[in-house]
Amino acid sequence: MLKKRIIPVVLLRNGAIVQSRLFKRFQVLGVPSAVVKRLSSWACDELIYLDISPGGSYSFGREDLNYPELSGISDVIELVSKSCLMPLTFGGGIRNIEDIRFRLSLGVDKITLNTAAVENPSLISEASKLFGSQCVVVSVDAKKNTDGRYCILKGGKELQDKCPVKWAQEVEALGAGEILLNSVDRDGTASGFDLELIEQVASNVKIPVIAIGGAGEWSHFEEVLLQTKASAVAAANIFQHSENSVYNLKKYLFDKGFNVRKPLKLSHLSSNL
């Protein structure tokens, strides 16, 4: 039986790592690569790195502290790839096949499509044929509209009249290898995952579904594994604010008998990161 994966997510916005809340508020946490080194030392299953920058600036603006001046997304990806000792999925700013090819050439293992997939669904099948479905993750941002129905968002803002379940089935048919399912309503709230949404989507597709949005304590991950068919559980903010967080979560789940990889014993070096 395949192991359930625990996946940290890093959000990049204009050269800085940020914490997100409801896709609206962003708190700066640090430079692009420091967190990747820390997560690598904790032997994470894999890493999802999402560029949510609204513009083309990637300067952290603190050259006085010897932080590198990053001229573009290629600098960011190269910096992250060198520090990343786990499978790396990269998303954000991908519009076409050449954007995908470019990111893969810089050391990325998988890419995520979001806005481009909504605007041009054929990009999913084209990318899948060229690079393999295992390389193509489609990110689905889901939110309840005013009448309580789930819909998807394009670009994190524009509500679309499309059901997440139907969209997930479409992207699966087009060749997507995985779905990253994000609850916009739970983003950064620490109130727990949207189990109803996750189960609706995960039970209606055959490809793996990675659930994200709402993690506030370890028991929230346990709820996803117990109550839904998600193949992996991801989070961003909760892994940023405590030492050895990924290790501690995997140990929490492993000790309770969940089918996750056994947490590796932390080295003296990593235990101090």
Image (tube, rainbow, N blue to C red):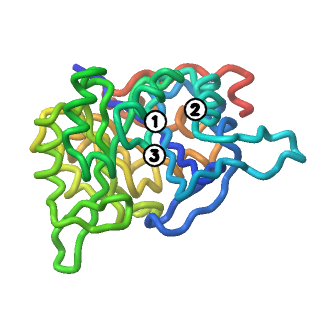
The location of residue 204, given as percent across then percent down, is 9, 44
- The answer to whether the residue labelled 1 contacts the one labelled 2, judged by CB atoms less than 8 Å apart, is yes
Residue on which the image places disc 2: 77
Residue on which the image places disc 1: 90
Q: Is residue 108 above or below residue 222?
A: above
Q: Secondary structure at mark 3?
A: loop
Assess disc 3: are there few (<14), some (14-19) or many (≥20) residues with their C-alpha within 10 Å of its C-alpha: many
Residue type marked 3: Gly
Seen in the image, is 144 located left or right of residue 183? left
Question: In the picture, residue 78 is in which quadrant?
Answer: top right
Question: Which residue in the rendered view is the most extreme toward the bottom?
Answer: 146
Near-viewer residue (242 or 47): 47
- The quadrant the C terminus occupies is top right
- The quadrant the N terminus occupies is top left
The location of residue 42, given as percent across then percent down, is 58, 28
The residue mark sitting in front, 1 or 3, is 3
Count of marks, rendered view: 3
Name the residue: 49% across, 64% down: 21
Q: Secondary structure at mark 1?
A: strand
Q: Earlier in the sequence, mark 3 or mark 2?
A: 2
The location of residue 44, given as percent across then percent down, is 50, 28
Name the residue: 44% across, 66% down: 22
Residue on which the image places disc 3: 93
Residue type marked 1: Phe
Q: Is residue 8 above or below residue 13?
A: above
The location of residue 149, given as percent across then percent down, is 16, 70
Near-viewer residue (109 or 87): 109
Near-viewer residue (60 or 211): 60
Residue type marked 2: Ile
Q: Is residue 160 above or below residue 261?
A: below
Seen in the image, is 256 located left or right of residue 18? left
Q: Secondary structure at mark 2?
A: helix
